[in-house]
Amino acid sequence: MANKASWLTAAQARPLKVDDAPMPQPSADEVVVRNHAVAINPVDWAIQAAGMLPLPYPHIGGCDTAGEIEAVGSSVKNLKVGDRVVATLDPYGGGDGPDSRRGAFQLFSLAREAGTTKIPDNISYSEAAVLPLAVSTSASALFQNDTLGLQLSTSGGNRGKVVLIWGGATSLGACAIQLVSAAGYDVATTSSTRNFDSMKSLGAKYVFDHAKANVVDDIIAELKHLDFGGVYCVVLVPEAIKQCAEIASKLDGRKLVSTVLAPVMPLADDLPSDVRYTKVYGTSLLDNEVGPAVWGKMVPEGLASGTFKCVPPPLVVGQGLEAIQGALDRWREGVSYQKVVVELP
């Protein structure tokens, strides 16, 4: 069977070029996924538009896929050929460096078993494709010892602490609300007013209008008497990080803001000095205990029971590898509580 891909032929080249690609072969702990739906993440657009990472060209991008297992490595235990799965991919620079074989924008991709999980038959590939990088990044930023360090649990018990997630209607935020709620914490979040009901349906107990001029004061007033567990800011805009820092500084409790800044990205100089700030690489959980806890237990159990939802809903903008460039452009136009998806029949 032949493989094809949407190639980024050079730094900032456009459009992507659909052409033949090598057929990936799995190592011991890897699987090959026949991709049926892939989603667009901000990093995918930034790689093409700004060349934000040094990559070998031509290169295949994309981090989110849902599809069917085509082949498995010799040590893979929990997956088999034919399984319907969702997988977090890392073509841009994981532990082994950039690797086009691990890009989603092709018919067949390599995925690590640690970041791949089965999906129930009642969930479509397009629905599942919205999850991978959002779940992995948020879980890394929330549960790792070097980030927010929340405790992992699926027991359903309430810990009596509240965690603020700034940007709940984003892909990262929607997954984070569910992860934090499943781990037994109360969730406060921000969104536009039109998404308030969606935020509450995911488990948020407190929802604030991010567009209000005094939103920081509102959050502090509401949470000041609660046991505060820290902030997860999913928005890269410096002003948002500054607002989160002010909240953490003025509330009693955990004075930590976990950001989605990559380790190489700088923080602003004018942030409160009594608050600690962490950065994250979105697939780092695959190399520690958080990965198995999230992808091996929390997410598959939640998908099977219906308690973990595939959100935000997919916005399917086309079919086939030729549609991926248009999907990147559509993401750039902006979406609200949706994730841009391309189906690969």
Image (cartoon, rainbow, N blue to C red):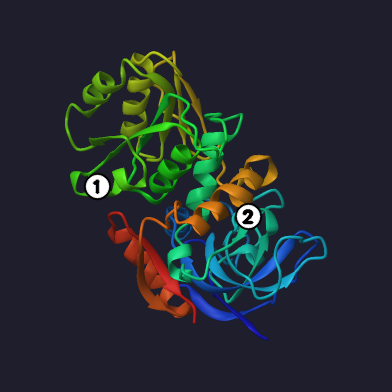
* x 42%, y 47%: residue: 172
Sort mark 1 into few (<14), some (14-19) or many (20+) by Cα contacts within 10 Å. few
Residue 234 is at least partly visible in this image: yes
* x 81%, y 60%: residue: 75
Q: How many marks?
A: 2
Residue 217, position as x, y percentages in the image: 22, 22
Q: Secondary structure at mark 1?
A: helix
Q: Is residue 167 above or below residue 20?
A: above
The residue that disc 1 covers is: 197
Q: Is residue 51 above or below residue 281?
A: below
> Mark 1 to mark 2: distance in Å?
30 Å
Residue 14 is at least partly visible in this image: no
The residue that disc 2 covers is: 115
In the rendered image, which quarter contains the N terminus?
A: bottom right
Q: Is residue 11 above or below residue 202?
A: below
* Residue mark closest to the camera, 1 vs 2: 1
Q: Quadrant of residue 317?
A: bottom left
Sort mark 2 into few (<14), some (14-19) or many (20+) by Cα contacts within 10 Å. many
Residue 71, position as x, y percentages in the image: 72, 73
